[in-house]
Each structure stands twice: as structure tokens, then as C-alpha cells.
Amino acid sequence: MTIQEAILGLLDGENLTSQEMQSVMTEIMEGKAPQAKIAAFLVLLRQKGEEVDEIFGAAQSILSHAEPLTLEGDPVDTCGTGGDGSGSFNISTIAAIIAHTCGVQIAKHGNRSISSRCGSADVLQALGFKIDLPKAQTEALFKEIGFVFLFAPIYHKAMKQVAPVRQELGIRTIFNMLGPLINPARTQRQMIGVYNKELTSTFTQVLRQFGSKHCIIVHGLTDEGTIIDEPSVCGPTVVSELQDGFVRNYTVHPEDFGLQRRKLSELQGGDVAENVRIVWEILDGRAPAAKEDAAVLAAGMTCYVSGISPTIKDGIDKARWVVKDGSAKRTLERMLERHRSIPTDLKI
């Protein structure tokens, strides 16, 4: 199917099969589609509503055009969709550091901030990580320390074909959903936060088609009626869990894990410098309880999907302990020391 044929079908409200979407997205990724048609396609798809097969087909196409990466092990990705507008601190990044201290291998896919003031790439780089290492060095570093950041622009160079259109449109499109689904290491375990409640179920269906082992997709709510694309300590969290092909949908509350219910205002982040300060504050044991609770909840879920914890509560307890005893801080310090030792000329 061509992008022109897809546009005509979308005008009639027709859904695309995964194969049709893969064909259209390949045309886009290879620079064969005019910008005007890309814009029309994205807007019509958004207006109709993106279906599971369409999201799966789009992710397949992008992965087929990505720089391949092989990591030895069974890492977890904590990349989320972003775009919740909550202004919270960078929870998924510090959760990855804490979970790694507990023994979880991490291959975090991410990018610089688009809708918020601080993305995962921004905070990790400000901490001292070399985020733009070439593939071979990243593979070697993962083998050595079991924690790497996969900077999206390095592995998804074909995405430059849609960057101008996305910027000009200024609206959410299917590409806002795809980040967690196109990790170039093709991680089989994930803890994903999403900006829309319906996406929890949608993502588990997409990931089941990919054959993922164990994934948790979360959409957090607050008692004030706002949303957060993380597990929430401010209200209920809608969860869709995929494990070995089976899906469970349920809702959890902070109290289920012995956590106090907090206010969203207690989780506010800020610019890059403020997010870096919060990371060290949490790892030093000096952070307000609300921020520490949010970090260990997300880290606990990450431990659970990794397989090192039999329950989310056990994962939270592990995460809390490595923060309290200083292990998580020491882990970050060791990783930063290793990154400082990497020659500058190995960067792209």
C-alpha cells in the first residue's frame, strides 16, 4: 500500500492492517513520501484513532530501519511515552538507576525533552553519562556494567524524515506512542508509562505481537484529577501487565504497597539542573518522602518485570533498601567514573 492509498482509505475511516502500515511507514522512512502527504496521513490517522495493528506495523517498519544492536543478557527498558504535562521530576531515569543497583540489567531507550523541560537524555548527560556512544562501545559497556542508555537519534536516523512535519503540526501523532516500542535492543522486558489510559491495553496487545516476555504498562492518576505517565503515588494507577503471552488488567493504589498518598505538587521537577539535583537528593537520602516514594515505586515495578522480584512489593522493598544503605548512590558514582574514563574520540 502506498501513502496515497492509505490517505484515501483513512478518509473513509478504514483501518490499516499491520502489513499496510509497515508498507506506508517504509515509504516515509526511506524519504519517498512528500511532506504534505506525511502530514495528511498523520492527521487522518490521529483523527480516526490508531489501532493495535497500525501501531505494531509502524513499530516494525521503524525497527527494520534502525541501527541493529545486540546486548548480551535480558535487560529492562523504562522508556515511557512522555507527554503527560504533569511537570513531575524525571522518575523513570532515577528508577532505572535504583533498579540497576538491585541487580537489574538496564537498556534505557530515550531522547531529549520534547514536551517537558527535561528528558532522560538531558538528565543523564548532565549527570555525566556519555549518551552518544557508538554502537560497538555501547555493546561493550553493557557487557561490562549492565547499564546503557540508547540515544534514539543514533539508532533511528530514518526518523529525520518526519521531524519537520511533526514540528510543524504541533500535535500528538502515532510517533508520540512509538518510543517505548522501538528500542533498538528489542528488549523483552519493559516498564512503560503512558499518557493515555486506553494505551495501557493497546500497548500490551502490541507487545504481545512482538513476543515480549514481561511488561507492565502504567497510567497514573492523581486525586486532583490530573494524570502522570508513571506509577502514581498520588492516586490510583491503571495497569496492564503482559507476562508470557497472558494479559492482566488491574488498578493499584499507593496504600497497596504501604505507601502514603501524596500530592502532585510534591513531585514537581523543573529544568535539567533541578532534575539532577533531585537525583542526588534522593540517592543521598535527603529527598522529601514523596519523591523517594515515587522513585522506589517505579524501581520496584522495574525489579518485578525483570524477574528478580516475585512481587511489586518485594521490588519496592529492594529499591528502598538500596537507597537507604547508600548502594544506589555508589552505583551511580561508579557508572559516572566509568563514563569519565571513556575517550572522547569514541563519541559520534
Image (cartoon, rainbow, N blue to C red):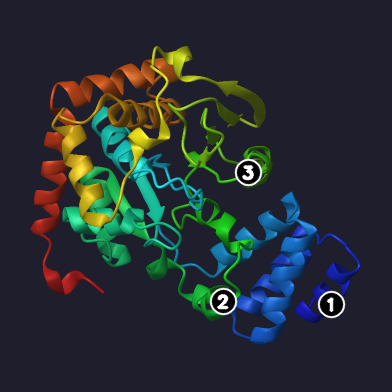
Estimate the x, y position of residue 143 in percent, counting from the top left: 26, 47
Does the image show residue 103?
no
Q: Nearer the viewer, mark 1 or mark 2?
A: 2
Does the image show residue 295?
yes
Residue drawn at the location 76% of the way across and 62% of the way down: 47
Mark nearer the N terminus (1 vs 2): 1
Element type at marker 3?
A: helix
In the rendered view, tell whether residue 47 sits above or below residue 344: above
Left or right of 19, for residue 31: left
Q: CA distance from mark 1 to mark 3?
A: 26 Å
Q: CA distance from mark 2 to mark 3?
A: 22 Å
Q: Amino acid at mark 3?
A: Phe
Residue beneath disc 1:
5
Q: Amino acid at mark 2?
A: Val
Mark nearer the N terminus (1 vs 3): 1
Q: Are marks 1 and 2 in contact (CB under 8 Å)?
A: no
Q: Mark 3 Cα within 10 Å, few/some/many (few <14, many 20+)?
A: many
In the rendered view, tell whether residue 224 sits above or below residue 112: above
Left or right of 235, for residue 291: left
Q: Are marks 1 and 3 in contact (CB under 8 Å)?
A: no
Estimate the x, y position of residue 322 in percent, counting from the top left: 21, 24
Residue beneath disc 3:
203
Instruction: In this rendered view, identify the residue nearer to me: 18 or 45.
Output: 45
Mark nearer the N terminus (2 vs 3): 2
In the rendered view, tell whether residue 249 sits above or below residue 168: above
Q: Mark 1 Cα within 10 Å, few/some/many (few <14, many 20+)?
A: few
Q: Amino acid at mark 1?
A: Glu
Q: CA distance from mark 1 to mark 2?
A: 19 Å
Element type at marker 1?
A: helix
Residue beneath disc 2:
162
- The C terminus lies in quadrant: bottom left
